[in-house]
Image: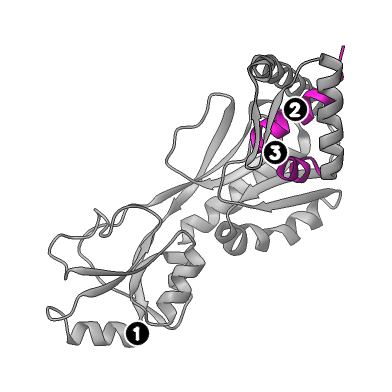
Amino acid sequence: MHSWDDLRFFLAVVRTGSLTAAAEKLAVNQSTVSRRINAFEQELKVRLFERFSTGYELTPEGDELLNRAQCIEEEMHAIDRHVMGKNVEMNGPIRVTCSLVIAHYFLIPLLKRFHTMHPGIVIHLDLSSSLHNLTAREADLAIRLTRDAIPETLIGRELGQIEYRVYGESKYLKWYRKHRGKEPLHWIGEDNTQDQPNWLPPNITPLKLVMRTNDVFATMDALKLGLGVGRLPCFMGEKEKKLQQLEIKHTIPTMPVWMLTHVDMRRVNRVSVFTAFITEEFRNQFACL
């Protein structure tokens, strides 16, 4: 029987499509990945991948192995979560993934007090907007701005609702109010296909899209430079002296903040303690917003 590591290397190459990306994911050298894949193929006496200049693609034999490898992987992760669930120690790491804006404005300011209360717990903070694979324990907790349904394998708590307003640099807004009806309103768009969001009132001055970005800090920088107006969370916009609200009659939809974890991880004491701490602190902060 082949070791779990053989399948782990195999799955990493399948999911990344290249030796370089698989090596980065596995935290090993590229030559190690190449050697392990070649040795695995020699043991099985089949070719699992076709090697192309654009990357690695599964052969029919590799595709047959993939389903079985994924089933074994899920069993390994289930064993790992079961063992972790029996961990009663208040020492060790907690891997938390969240967006940069949540980390900067909410999470990091809380960590000093949490560390004082629980000095043996180390927070591993991964700043990312994607939902890490909590089933595979790439992260223990995820804090996300999302309206999406929660997968059945996860449990979640809503921490609060983020409110938004439209902001612009004060000089630009003064210019816009003076020329309203004559000049279009310059708009900093978000990373979607809408040039004008459906929550803006239809009778607002026609918009001129001047920039689009998927990063809220880039939006804020553009607004402060007077490039136009755009949507920001209130907790960001109200703290910037250069920015003012553009009053609009329509209500801007809020965005819920969720904390997610795998159902098995709730039995890990240090995760439960951190979850309870963050839940209380976030809800207190959102109540003041």
In the displayed structure, would residue 130 be above or below residue 114? above
Q: Quadrant of the N terminus?
A: top right
- Residue 211 picture location, percent across and down: 37, 69
Indicate the secondary structure of the residue bearing disc 2. helix
Under mark 1, the amino acid is Ser
**Can you identify the residue that label 2 sits on?**
10
Under mark 3, the amino acid is Asp
Q: CA distance from mark 2 to mark 1?
A: 56 Å
The magenta stretch is 1-27
Q: Is residue 10 magenta?
A: yes
Q: CA distance from mark 1 to mark 3?
A: 42 Å
Check residue 140 in the rendering and tell me which mark sits there, or answer none.
3
Mark 1: few, some, or many residues within 10 Å (few <14, many ≥20)?
some
Left or right: residue 120 compared with residue 46: right
- Residue 167 picture location, percent across and down: 35, 72
In the displayed structure, would residue 146 be above or below residue 103? above
**Can you identify the residue that label 1 sits on?**
170
Which secondary structure type mostly characterizes the magenta part of the structure? helix
Under mark 2, the amino acid is Phe
Indicate the secondary structure of the residue bearing disc 3. loop
Check residue 204 in the rendering and tell me which mark sits there, or answer none.
none
Q: Check contact, mark 2 vs mark 1: CB within 8 A.
A: no
